[in-house]
Amino acid sequence: MIYKREILEKLSNLLVQVNETINPEVKTYLDGFNGPFSQALKENYKIAEAEKLPLCQDTGIVEFFVFLGNEVILQEPIFSTLNEVVEKVYTGNPFRFSLVSDPLFERKSTKNNTPAVVHIFQVSGKSLEIKFLIKGGGSENLSALFMLKPSISVQELKDVIMRHVKENGAKGCPPLHIGIGIGGTSDKAMVLSKLALTKSFKERNPNPTYADFEEGLLKDLNALKIGFQGLKEGVSVFSVHVEYAPTHIATLPVGVSLDCYLCRKGVVKFEDR
């Protein structure tokens, strides 16, 4: 059995760390950037880490991707444990509660940043892997779903994504991480685009054709010269990742998700011994 306390302790510590400490991959880019407001950006992450403060006032909605082995026994439903993690972290630290319970009418805070968004993927074995994103509202508002013609060319698909990022990227607190979900159904494509954002910048798709697509799109998007904070200097996009799935012969769903320059994410893994 994997006990609740193991998940609570390990995941809570990482969730705090990711909110307060700069992503090491992002830090490399930030430290090498000397354009407008670069000193302020560098000072911000140093103060956040030293003073145990959040890197951004938008401490976001927490989105989990749970890879649950079929031989794993949990002490309680994983939804309950993950929501307890979020409540513990967000009420125990100076992190903003970003969630409202009713999206349209009352829009009142849930006062503990729950419920989290949880996606579960059943896998074989005795392991439990939990990936997460801390997703701010600015970049989340730039999410898009395109239901394209199956006959569309690869270049036409690139043009759709390029146009979306060109028109909206500066509003997402760039440099950006671009996640693309291709195939499945409309909802599946969006989930895949979010899952793609959990990857390391240097990671490439194991399928060489999709890896070439990622690299080509990354090069073209950086040619847009959006730059740090939309000020046209420095890199525009850190990386591009694609997740794909089989789809209906009459459809080509494409989900596009953008993550802001902080790219707050993490992963923990447990074994049921």
Image: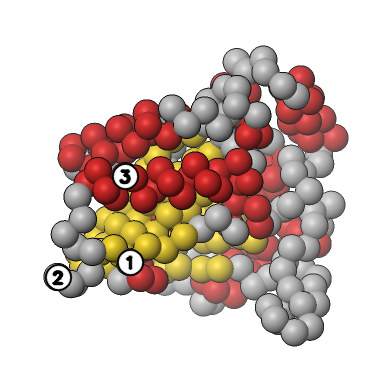
* Quadrant including the N terminus: bottom left
Question: Disc 1 marks which residue?
Answer: 147
Residues at marks 2 and 3 touching, judged by CB atoms closer than 8 Å: no
Give the Cα separation between the discs numbered 3 and 1.
14 Å
Label 2 secondary element: loop
At horizontal 47% and vertical 53% (from top left) the residue drawn is 257
Q: Marks 2 and 3: which is nearer the front?
A: 3
Type of amino acid under label 2: Ile
* Residue in the foreground of this view, choosing between 82 and 42: 42
Identify the disc placed on residue 50. Answer: none
Residue 133 in sight from this viewpoint: yes
Question: In the figure, is residue 71 to the left or right of 28?
Answer: left
Question: In the figure, is residue 39 to the left or right of 150?
Answer: right
Q: Position of residue 211 (x, y in %)?
A: 25, 37
Type of amino acid under label 3: Lys
Residue density around tag 3, few if under 14, some if 14–19, many if 20 or more, within 10 Å: some
Q: Position of residue 268 (x, y in %)?
A: 50, 50
* Quadrant including the C terminus: bottom left
Identify the disc placed on residue 249. Answer: 2
At horizontal 66% and vertical 57% (from top left) the residue drawn is 137
